[in-house]
Image: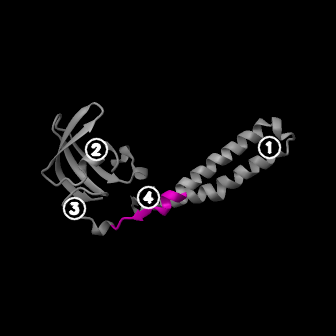
Amino acid sequence: MSTVSYYTEEGLKKLKEELNHLRDVERPKSSQAIADARDKGDLSENAEYDAAKEAQGLLELKISKLEETLSNARLIDESQLDTSKVLVLSTVKLKNQQNGMVLSYTLVAESEADLKAGKISVTSPIGKGLLGKEVGDVAEITVPNGTLKFDILEISRS
């Protein structure tokens, strides 16, 4: 069963670039490595050939997974996003009730998540806990070391 993933224009572009790189650059390199190893003689005792074939198999698997991801990818029209509740691509300003820290996160697709840039996956525990909340709500989120409570201060588009 394949799942639909939602991406920004930038995220979708990165996926396509990665797939094109794997197909146009890495695949020919892999084929050349196999050909070079084959030229070295007896294939039954050629570890280099076996390693090149295995690397090719892993590359083809990665390409296949990326193709599947792209076939199920949907572009999000950011201008149509509702800011009354937390959705994918919402930027949420939160206040941790425990320590008073104010944080800001943008909810994105799993492949676009980058905590350093303030982008968290909608499939992460915090992302799931924030989805559907409105300004003024308290999000109770269970994480490995307990339950966190966040006040939803503000919701905007990314």
For label 4, the residue is 11
The amino acid type found where label 2 is placed reads Ile
> Tag 2's secondary structure?
helix
Q: Secondary structure at mark 3?
A: loop
Looking at this rendering, what residue extends furthest in the front direction? 1
Q: Which residue is mark 2?
A: 126
Could you give the CA–CA distance between mark 3 and mark 4, rounded to whole angstroms?
A: 21 Å
Is the residue marked by circle 4 packed among few (<14), some (14-19), or many (20+) residues within 10 Å? some
Question: Is 20 on the left-hand or right-hand side of 131?
Answer: right
Amino acid on which disc 1 is placed:
Ala
Q: Earlier in the sequence, mark 2 or mark 1?
A: 1
User: Which residue in the structure is indicated by mark 3?
Assistant: 83
Locate residue 30, reporting x and y percent: 70, 50
Please tell me which residue is depicted at 41% across the width and 64% down the height of the picture. 74
For the residue carrying disc 2, how many other residues have a C-alpha within 10 Å: few (<14), some (14-19), or many (20+)?
Answer: many
Q: Residue under label 1, please give it.
A: 37
The tag earlier along the polypeptide, 1 or 3, is 1
Residue 43, relative to residue 89: is it above or below?
above
Disc number at residue 8? none
Segment colored magenta? 67-77
* Cα–Cα span, label 2 and label 1: 48 Å
Q: The disc labelled 4 sits on which kind of residue?
A: Gly
Helix, strand or loop under label 1: helix
> Of label 2 and label 3, which has the lower sequence position?
3
Q: Is residue 145 magenta?
A: no
Three-letter residue code for mark 3: Thr
Position of residue 58 in the picture relative to residue 146 (left or right): right
